[in-house]
Image: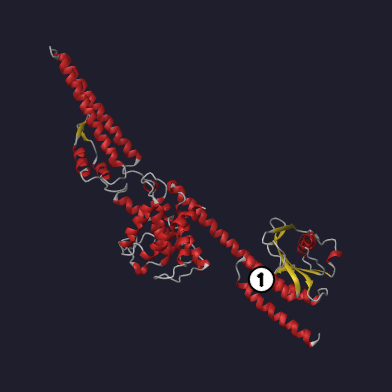
Amino acid sequence: MDPAGLARRCEKLSSILEIARALAVERDLDRLLGMIVEAAARVAEADRCSIFVLDRDRGELWTRVAQGLPGTAQEIRAPLGTGVVGHVASTGQALNLPDAYADPRFHRAIDQATGYRTKSLLTVPMKRAGSADGGEVVGVLQALNRRDGRPFNGEDQGLLEGLGGQAAAAIDNALLHQEIQRLFEGFVRASVVAIESRDPTTAGHSERVAKLTVGLAGRLERVESGPWAGRVFTADELQELRYAALLHDFGKVGVREHVLVKANKLYPHERAVLEQRFALIRRTAELASARRLLALQEAGGADLAARRREEEARLCADLARIDELLAFVQGCDRPNVLAGDGFERLAQIAALRYPDGAGEAPYLTSDEAARLSIPRGSLSDEERREIESHVTHTFRFLSQIPWTRALRRVPDIAHGHHEKLDGSGYPRRLLSPAIGLETRMMTIADMYDALTASDRPYKKAVPREEALDILAFEAKAGHLDADLFRVFADAVPALVLEEIA
């Protein structure tokens, strides 16, 4: 080989090594395939190149990259064993055609569709190193028309096969990365299904919070002033943020279901017992009235009819009073804010007694009176602590997962979504410096969606403007990040439209 040719070959070999280093770190499959095609054209001095990846499960070759051909972003698939690329993929042997049109395996349809004229054609397998048969085929590289007009030679073939080996390893890595991504995605989706199956009334909450949080991150990158100006999120950081938001409530699987879905202050079976008791009180009043009427009948007298009317009126008044007491108690059972005099009246009702055959029993048990006296919402202090424990359960669960380096902060981000900047949140009562930006963003999105989500058994949906007013009050009180809230408030109409889309 002449010195000039040797220098050119050395330069190409050096280029292949440089290309191999670049391919080894690329994990996006489409970008990787594009890089391989460009490198192949440079190494083989070809006018155009294309690449096909083998899908063994379907027995097909596919590509989304064909250099220089229009409309190739759409995936193209071809059966294994047909055409030039199918032959090379199935045999594992390179094919060098000085005149492509002279070989019946060459399909002229693409040339006819594009107006391109293929002359010389070099097609080599991309082989995975290490197998006993010399390497399992991962795909096929194809070079079209050497730039100097001559056919491709053995040197071109050797260099392209060398690049193919590097490309095969890079494609394996990218495909493995895709599989891991799909595995993570499937796991996260399954986890969200598990969360929502425990409490169907909150279905869609995790997905909406994730979209709002990631959307807020996108808006934050456009902010030109304030403490968060210039903050840019990488693709890995956005994925980390999205997974944390999707899984922020996973710990609810550790909360007892009847507490998780509790809509009123009394559980359904407790309310049923209470209503049966009031029905018994009603029947007891009717029985007492019947006994008094019987006594009147036995006593007789000229004014019997008048006394009967008096007793009937007394019974009507007693039953109306009992019904009114029951209606009041049922009203207290709803998760509304209890009026100031409601506590006193509940205590009065609890002090009432009725004969139960074994003495006297209270209208309300002490436990019922305590539950009905919950001032706001439907949960007792103990039940609220159990609900709040879902954050700790979330962290413990997520901490068991061997996250990749790019996703390692998912547990920490999710752990703080109920913390407040002044330390009044839970479960760790963190102060502002200990609460990261991603967690602050998720907290705002979580609160907004919890307020505006469709009606639930224990609350009504709040209109958007009212929800923003509540969040503004929280920000002013030092609970939420005021700078982030302003960005969110400005962006929320567009974010909601994006979430619906």
From this view, report whether residue 1 is shown above or below residue 195.
below
Front-most of residues 378 and 150: 150
Q: Which residue is mark 1?
A: 35
Instruction: Please determine whether, in this image, residue 125 is positioned above or below residue 343.
Output: below
* 343 lies left or right of 126: left
Q: Nearer the viewer, residue 222 or 365?
A: 222
* Three-letter amino acid code of the residue under disc 1: Met
Q: Residues within 10 Å of mark 1 (few under 14, many from 20)?
A: some
Furthest toward the right, the residue is 102
Q: How is the image coloured?
A: secondary structure
Q: Position of residue 279 (x, y in %)?
A: 28, 30
Q: Quadrant of the rendered structure where residue 182 is?
A: bottom right
The residue lying toward the viewer, choosing from 382 and 142, is 142
**Residue 246 in view (yes/no):** no
Element at label 1: helix
Q: How many marks?
A: 1
Q: Is residue 105 above or below residue 325?
A: below
Instruction: Say which quadrant the N terminus sits in.
Output: bottom right
Q: Position of residue 257 (x, y in %)?
A: 40, 47
Depth order, front residue of 445/135: 445
Q: Residue at x 79, y 60 (%)?
A: 112
Q: Residue 53: give x, y in percent of width and height.
A: 70, 63
Single out the residue that lies furthest toward the left.
302
Point out residue 343 in the picture as x, y percentages from the top left corner.
21, 44
* Residue depicted at x 68% and y 69%: 168
Q: Is residue 291 visible?
A: yes
In the rendered image, which quarter is residue 93 located in? bottom right
Q: Residue furthest bottom?
A: 3
Identify the residue shown where x is 33% and y is 43%.
264
